[in-house]
Image (spheres, rainbow, N blue to C red):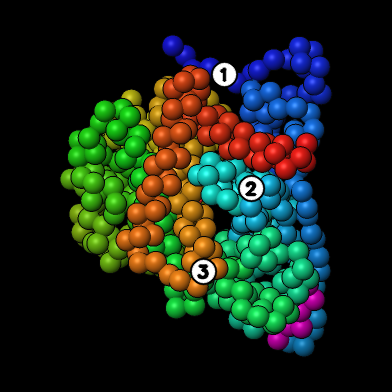
Amino acid sequence: MPETVLTGPTAAETGRVEAAPVKPKAAKALNSFQIAQAQFDKVAEYLGLDPATRELLRYPLREYQFAIPVRMDNGTVKVFRGFRVQHNDARGPGKGGIRFHPQETVDTVRALSMWMTWKCAVVDIPLGGAKGGVICDPHNLSAREQEQICRGWVRQIARNVGPISDVPAPDVMTNAQHMLWILDEFEHIHGGRYPGFITGKPVHLGGSLGRTEATGYGVVFTLREALKQLGMRPENTSASVQGFGNVAQYAIELYTRLGGRVIAVSCWDQADQCSYTYRKRTGVDLQELLSITDRFGGIGKSKAVELGYELLHGDAWIEQNVEILIPAAIEHQITGDNVGKIAPTVRIIAEGANGPTTLEADTEIQNRGILLIPDFLANAGGVTCSYFEQVQSNMNYFWEKDEVLGKLDVKMTSAYIAVSELARRENLYMRDAAYAIAIGRVAKACHDRGWV
Ligand code: NAD
């Protein structure tokens, strides 16, 4: 039986105000926030959300945009633009990273904050969605200048964020050091120690064990459940992975421990400014590949060839005769142009990266009946472990790594089962089922609080 297409009743039937329809052809022109809203509209229609709830959830609750003046190393003052967007905190304090990026826009931050709301809701952690950013390029800034941006960012917003309202974390081009500067300035302003204000801290300063592994392992916890669902044994499967960074490396490690075989890995080559796929049909050796990989997840090309890896073009990872594809690099990698190259053997796609699949490719994957584990479910292990870090920091009592990873497994497994059961019961595509659960939970929290 074909899967249900989420169309829902028409506006005339419900008397509701209908959001402007999104034509698939125009999808490429949409910015990230419009895409996030279109995804929301589709599921809101299916859930039959009332107009007020739709209006509330289509937009962030709060947005802060501010100037951060910084005295640069050469003595001049430069003014940077900073953002914090809090999409929804009905289920708990906002949670989301702070990005440093020269092309940052408020629309990207809005979209990412909305996706954080759904991600926290789908794994059922008591947090909302938020995101922050600064328009800047850390490549061209000294450490002192970056420190001033971090401290300036939090000075502008210190009364609107905090351990019980909105909890930031590292993201694109920010790391634990940036977070410690932000935490230190926040504690200076508020006069106390608030380790639960930030996650992604180093372990010796209140970070959680297991955070490094959490996203990649989380992908494989959901993949393991998907294999069970299809009656497949990991040891009888092989996988091809795009990316060889934090998420991919730990996903490969755990999948291999379960008995699976990764036969191809693709990554970006800085020198040639293009990507390559490294294939070993007998299965890649993770430790061997790690020994020739830089800290950005780039594999040494000539050394890989010496070790017997076949060097293929960057898109070849998607064409392999495997049962499992794991896109774990960047967004927009499975597109209308290459989705047709996915081999008939592929049964599962586990989206480790955020937004790796375009709308056009998504429709094709759905039509082919491939079991897709959507990004905001598959890669939610990171935020789940950040939540554990927040809990441990607030208690000032820290768990052993096995305890953290055990709790992570429970959360990811229950989230996967809830989504797959809804998908089966209502005959939905997995992405739609995940959205339906997440949006339904947030809408209920807004109703129960009496907001709408
Ligand atoms: P990373 O920077 O550690 O690694 C990225 C990898 O992708 C590198 O190996 C790089 O070479 C490769 N890559 C980049 N462009 C490529 C291309 N065009 N073709 C092939 N390979 C390419 O990043 P990460 O932390 O592993 O994150 C990967 C993805 O997962 C991102 O989309 C990120 O937003 C998402 N994610 C990460 C986390 C986390 O905790 N790290 C959590 C949730 C989501």
* Crowd rating for badge 3 (residues with CA inside 10 Å; few <14, some 14–19, many 20+): few
- Marks 2 and 3, the one that precedes in the sequence: 2
- Marks 1 and 3, the one that precedes in the sequence: 1
In terms of secondary structure, what is the magenta stretch mainly? strand
What residue would you read off at disc 1? 5
Quadrant location, the C terminus: top right
Identify the magenta region: 68-73
Indicate left or right for 216 with 359 as reference: left
* Crowd rating for badge 2 (residues with CA inside 10 Å; few <14, some 14–19, many 20+): many
- Name the residue at 30% across, 63% down: 290
Residue flagged by tag 3: what amino acid is it?
Met
Residue 69 is one of the magenta-drawn residues = yes
Residue flagged by tag 1: what amino acid is it?
Val
What residue would you read off at disc 2? 91
Residue 385: percent from the left, percent from the top? 46, 58
- Name the residue at 72% across, 78% down: 190
Residue flagged by tag 2: what amino acid is it?
Arg
For the residue pair 423 and 163, the one nearer the viewer reads as 163
Residue 293: percent from the left, percent from the top? 34, 64
What residue would you read off at disc 3? 395
- Name the residue at 76% across, 40% down: 450
- Are the residues tagged 1 and 2 within 8 Å (C-beta)? no
For the residue pair 329 and 126, the one nearer the viewer reads as 126
* Distance from the alpha carbon under mark 1 to that under mark 2: 29 Å
In the rendered view, tell whether residue 358 sits above or below residue 106: above
Indicate left or right for 370 with 361 as reference: left
Q: For the residues carrying marks 2 and 3, which lies nearer the camera in this image?
A: 3
